[in-house]
């Protein structure tokens, strides 16, 4: 088991607000052609070939367009230089850059960037770019959000470090708001406003990648932003397939982590659909049903014993582990007795544990325990033989830390509407 590492950092931050509207400027709004419900950025090469056929395109143009969009983050058809001019002209009418635009970018003093992205109906969500921090001394400290991705295969890491490549983890959203109603989470307090489409989900990565510095490389994607990914299953899965497509962004599935509050049937589906290869993070946050149901209403539908059975059945590839996320909320789930119960609950499961001292949110008086409590909890988990990390707070000066991604724009100040089916 890896040694337990603490890398908690507090920040007194200087925040730089960048008006990014000018940087990714959408073309003037025209008729937006969307083949059925499939937005332009959710199309595969074959889908593109079908769209381009009536516009005079040849079948191979489908793959070219797909590659421009997904491999190179080019959304302006005039830059797709290997296409015939007439096709580039026609593509101008298909609204590629209209799926999502960057409304603003806030940069943390730790180089984390929170992008507020705006969709065609004016809804906004947030996505966060988190560069890996330099290692401290000889120790191999994890970056906070790549804890969720498998750290087993870092063979190219040293070479990249020699080249001074900075690996970036991107945290993306899957819903506008969230229906799950977890009491410690800004997205949950807001309620679900709408599902995001597959092209909106994947567009966050496409535009996010175009914001990387020359020495940065997208390494991991975590579905830990706003929303419950498995409550938007079909769009999420399509986005995952696009993110891993070899002709596109080509992320390895082990470098993608889906975080869920515990929707059991969809955990089973995900396991089957990707043969367990997509990283799985479970927001556990409690060790008994009473406490968990108070913090996370979804527990009434899928209680702990059902969730744990689903985790035991998950078809995890060899040497991979499920990430257990445990947000520590003072006075609710943070006692040493709970740490001991957690150890018992996890016995026999290949897991690593991420402890997240609760980030305060405006809508709640709940908060994190003091550091002594956090360390005491961690020690019990470590002494039981588990890898257990306390997540470094990244980007909290720009409200980009876990659970702080709130609604803004037209949904700002919206009243909470919890719509979890509790039957
Ligand atoms: N809906 C998914 C993914 C988004 S939330 C899920 O719940 O897993 C990503 C992680 O942030 C979850 O583990 C969630 O419990 C945690 N989180 C939410 N609000 C938080 C807060 N205020 N402080 C710390 N962690 C929080
Ligand atoms: Fe939704 Fe996850 Fe927040 Fe719970 S923690 S409300 S599931 S986003």
Image (cartoon, rainbow, N blue to C red):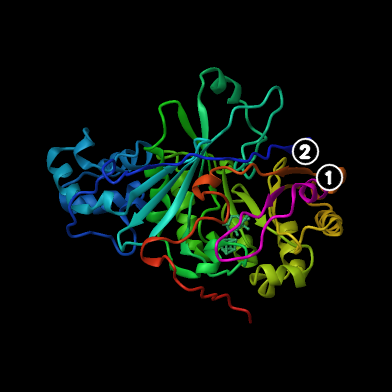
Q: Are dots 1 and 2 in contact, CB under 8 Å?
A: yes
**SS state under label 1:** helix
Between the C-alphas of marks 1 and 2, the distance is: 8 Å
Q: Residue 379 carries which label?
A: 1
Figure quadrant of the C terminus: bottom right
Give above or below for 138 relative to 264: above
The quarter of the picture where the N terminus appears is top right
Give the residue pinned by disc 2: 4
Q: Assess mark 2: CB under 8 A from ligand 1? A: no
101 up-or-down from 83: above or below: below
The stretch in magenta equals: 354-376
Indicate the position of residue 60 as horizontal and vertical percent values.
27, 41
Estimate the x, y position of residue 63 in percent, counting from the top left.
31, 41
Q: What element carries label 2?
A: loop
Q: Which of the four quarters of the rendered structure image does ligand 2 lie in?
A: bottom right
The answer to whether 196 appears left or right of 291 in the picture is left
**Which is more N-terminal, label 2 or label 1?**
2
Magenta segment: does it hold 47?
no
Estimate how packed mark 2 is, as few (under 14), some (14 to 19) or many (20 or more) residues with alpha carbons within 10 Å: some
Q: Depth check: 422 or 274 in front? A: 422
Crowd around label 1: few <14 · some 14–19 · many ≥20 (10 Å)? some
């Amino acid at each position: 088991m890896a040694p337990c590492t603490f890398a908690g950092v507090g920040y007194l931050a200087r925040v730089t607000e960048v008006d990014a509207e000018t940087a990714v400027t959408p073309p003037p709004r025209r008729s937006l052609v969307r083949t059925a419900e499939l937005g332009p950025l959710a199309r595969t090469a074959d889908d593109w070939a079908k769209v381009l056929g009536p516009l005079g395109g040849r079948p191979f143009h489908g793959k070219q367009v797909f590659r421009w969009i997904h491999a190179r983050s080019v959304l302006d058809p005039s830059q797709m230089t290997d296409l015939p001019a007439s096709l580039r002209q026609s593509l101008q009418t298909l609204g590629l850059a209209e799926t999502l635009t960057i409304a603003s970018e806030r940069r943390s003093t730790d180089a984390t960037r929170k992008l507020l992205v705006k969709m065609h109906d004016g809804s906004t969500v947030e996505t966060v770019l988190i560069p890996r921090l330099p290692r401290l001394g000889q120790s191999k400290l994890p970056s906070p959000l790549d804890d969720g991705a498998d750290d087993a295969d870092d063979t190219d890491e040293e070479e990249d470090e020699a080249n001074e490549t900075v690996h970036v983890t991107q945290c993306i959203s899957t819903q506008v708001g969230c229906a799950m109603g977890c009491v410690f989470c800004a997205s949950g307090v807001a309620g679900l406003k709408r599902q995001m489409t597959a092209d909106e989900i994947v567009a966050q990565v496409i535009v996010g990648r175009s914001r990387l510095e020359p020495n940065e490389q997208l390494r991991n994607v975590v579905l830990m932003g706003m929303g419950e990914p498995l409550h938007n299953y079909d769009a999420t899965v399509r986005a995952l397939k696009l993110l891993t497509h070899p002709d596109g962004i080509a992320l390895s599935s082990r470098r993608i982590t889906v975080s869920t509050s515990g929707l059991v049937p969809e955990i089973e589906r995900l396991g089957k659909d990707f043969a367990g290869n997509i990283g799985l993070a479970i927001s556990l946050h409690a060790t008994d049903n009473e406490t968990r149901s108070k913090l996370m209403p979804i527990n009434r539908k899928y209680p702990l014993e059902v969730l744990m059975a689903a985790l035991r059945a998950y078809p995890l590839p060899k040497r991979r582990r499920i990430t257990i996320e445990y947000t520590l909320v003072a006075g609710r789930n943070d006692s040493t007795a709970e740490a001991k119960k957690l150890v018992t609950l996890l016995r026999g499961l290949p897991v690593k544990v991420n402890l997240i001292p609760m980030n305060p949110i405006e809508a709640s008086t709940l908060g994190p325990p003091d550091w002594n409590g956090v360390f005491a909890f961690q020690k019990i988990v470590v002494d039981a033989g588990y890898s257990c990390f306390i997540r470094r707070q990244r980007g909290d000066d720009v409200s980009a830390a876990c659970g702080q991604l709130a609604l803004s724009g037209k949904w700002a100040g919206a009243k909470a509407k919890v719509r979890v089916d509790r039957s």
